């Protein structure tokens, strides 16, 4: 047995279509609602924000959506991504379980995010759009959209959550290197940002606030559209290229997962690895447990309410039915900035309500401990977000050890931590702690849910 086994596909193996799980769900999702009227929205309502092709993908019930050739050609720069068997981690854990991980950190921006930033930039370019506005938490999405926009000659304005803007300066530099503009959110550039700063001058920001700023820019400028890096149906669908490749690679390994684990913030990397396997299960294929792992300081799936809520703090974006902590919820500034969103993707929320997945909340210190172990055994330093998936997979492997079971575990290592070394420096210096949330603040945020949408 070698220390590490790699399963590689070739460029011709890049999937030719994205998978849409809505075609296989036992019951449909609740429709998005207009933030002003509370009524179901149609394509025309979304047109100020998104190009029509993405709007059609958002509402599609087709199982497969063709990937345009220019997008597949761009994917060839880093796809297919490798799948590894983690022999050294298995040995360190002394577990009978087999652990595999799909590694998305080989992309130009170091994460899974270009899987959707490239098609979003392409469709906007095709429709004649010149500028994009967006938000970013840890900076992975902002970096990825900046990269994709450079491919298709688009301008990008990024609103980066202020606490991450301060923690991760090299992400800003990366965005600017690709040609994007990046400011800390809340900012003075928008009415939404100025309103927050007037009320809370020292606000550390949130993804909900940054989304408000980006949506405002798109809604008030005819030459600008909005791009979102997670949560929406079309974004999750673009990420299913990850799981589709993993299915082929597991065949190469002569194996099939009993358990799939992924971290969850907005839901895109989780859906990317899990939905193709879940879809196969729903169509009568292999059974598989699917585990979503989230931070205990922002526990949307394990603590949030499944209800209609606004996608942003300023209540400009459509209302969607999801697990939410309330649009006014401001999470603490823990280092996994990509997991600090107040809501969960409606599709991920829906499959949890159907009992098709389970979710667990983990604390920051145990995740960094797992990330360090993974780095020392598998030689890849995970992003703070990805350490949650690592810890979740380790927990499953230790369960197998305790139960004497030789199960197969697959997890998505959604990005590397090369721009997050300050977080590791703080961890080694003992400066990190297990942050949580204020129950009274959570109760206040949930009390602010839009009543018209959640009436019995």
Image (cartoon, rainbow, N blue to C red):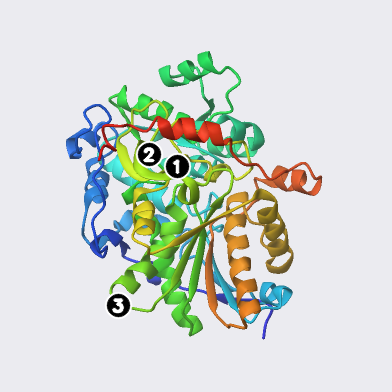
Q: Quadrant of residue 351?
A: bottom left
Q: Quadrant of residue 281?
A: bottom left
Q: Is residue 40 left or right of residue 395?
A: left
- The percent position of residue 339, horizontal first and vertical second, equals 53, 45
Identify which residue is drawn at 41% across, 17% down: 191
Residue linked to disc 3: 284
Q: Is residue 78 above or below residue 57?
A: below
Residue linked to disc 2: 227
Q: Quadrant of the N terminus?
A: bottom right
Which residue occupies the foreground of this view, 121 or 326?
A: 326
- The percent position of residue 343, horizontal first and vertical second, equals 43, 42
Secondary structure type for disc 3: loop
Identify which residue is drawn at 43% across, 21% down: 192
2 and 1 marks in contact (CB < 8 Å): yes
Q: Is residue 367 above or below residue 167?
A: below
Residue 145 numbered tag: 1
């Amino acid at each position: 047995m070698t220390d590490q086994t790699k399963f590689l596909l070739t460029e011709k193996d890049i999937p030719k279509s994205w998978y849409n799980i809505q075609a296989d769900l036992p019951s449909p999702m609740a429709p998005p609602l207009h933030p002003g009227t509370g009524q179901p929205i149609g394509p025309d309502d979304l047109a100020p924000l998104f190009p029509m092709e993405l709007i059609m993908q958002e509402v599609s019930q087709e199982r497969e959506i063709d990937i345009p050739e220019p997008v597949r050609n761009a994917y060839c720069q880093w796809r297919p991504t490798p799948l590894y068997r983690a022999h050294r981690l298995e040995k360190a854990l002394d577990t009978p379980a087999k652990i595999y991980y799909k590694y998305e950190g080989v992309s130009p921006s170091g994460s899974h995010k270009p899987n959707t930033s490239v098609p979003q930039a392409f469709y906007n370019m095709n429709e004649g759009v010149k500028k994009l506005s967006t938000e970013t938490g840890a900076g992975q999405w902002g970096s990825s959209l900046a990269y994709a926009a450079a491919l298709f000659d688009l301008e990008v304005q990024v609103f980066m959550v202020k606490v991450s803007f301060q923690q991760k300066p090299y992400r800003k530099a990366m965005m600017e290197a690709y040609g994007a503009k990046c400011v800390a959110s809340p900012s003075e550039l928008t009415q939404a940002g100025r309103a927050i700063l007037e009320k809370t001058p020292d606000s550390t920001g949130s993804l909900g606030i940054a989304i408000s700023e980006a949506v405002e820019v798109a809604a008030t400028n005819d030459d600008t559209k909005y791009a979102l890096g997670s949560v929406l149906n079309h974004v999750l669908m673009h990420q299913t290229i990850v799981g589709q490749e993993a299915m082929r690679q597991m065949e190469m390994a002569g194996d099939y997962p009993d358990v799939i684990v992924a971290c969850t913030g907005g839901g895109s990397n989780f859906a990317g690895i899990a939905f193709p396997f879940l879809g196969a299960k729903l169509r009568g294929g292999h059974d598989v447990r699917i585990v979503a792992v989230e931070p205990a300081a922002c526990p949307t799936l394990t603590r949030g309410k499944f209800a209609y809520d606004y996608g942003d703090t300023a209540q400009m974006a459509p209302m969607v039915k999801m697990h939410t902590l309330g649009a006014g919820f401001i999470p603490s500034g823990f280092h996994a900035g990509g997991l600090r969103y107040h809501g969960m993707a409606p599709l991920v929320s829906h499959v949890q309500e159907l009992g098709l997945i389970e979710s667990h909340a983990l604390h920051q210190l145990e995740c960094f401990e797992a990330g360090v172990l993974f780095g020392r055994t598998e030689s890849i330093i995970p992003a703070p977000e990805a350490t949650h998936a690592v810890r979740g997979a380790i927990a499953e492997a230790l369960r197998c050890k305790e139960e004497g079971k030789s199960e197969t575990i697959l997890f998505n290592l959604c990005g590397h931590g090369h721009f997050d070394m300050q977080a590791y420096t703080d961890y080694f210096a003992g400066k990190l702690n297990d942050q949580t949330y204020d129950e009274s603040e959570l109760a206040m945020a949930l009390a602010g849910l839009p009543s018209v949408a959640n009436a019995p």
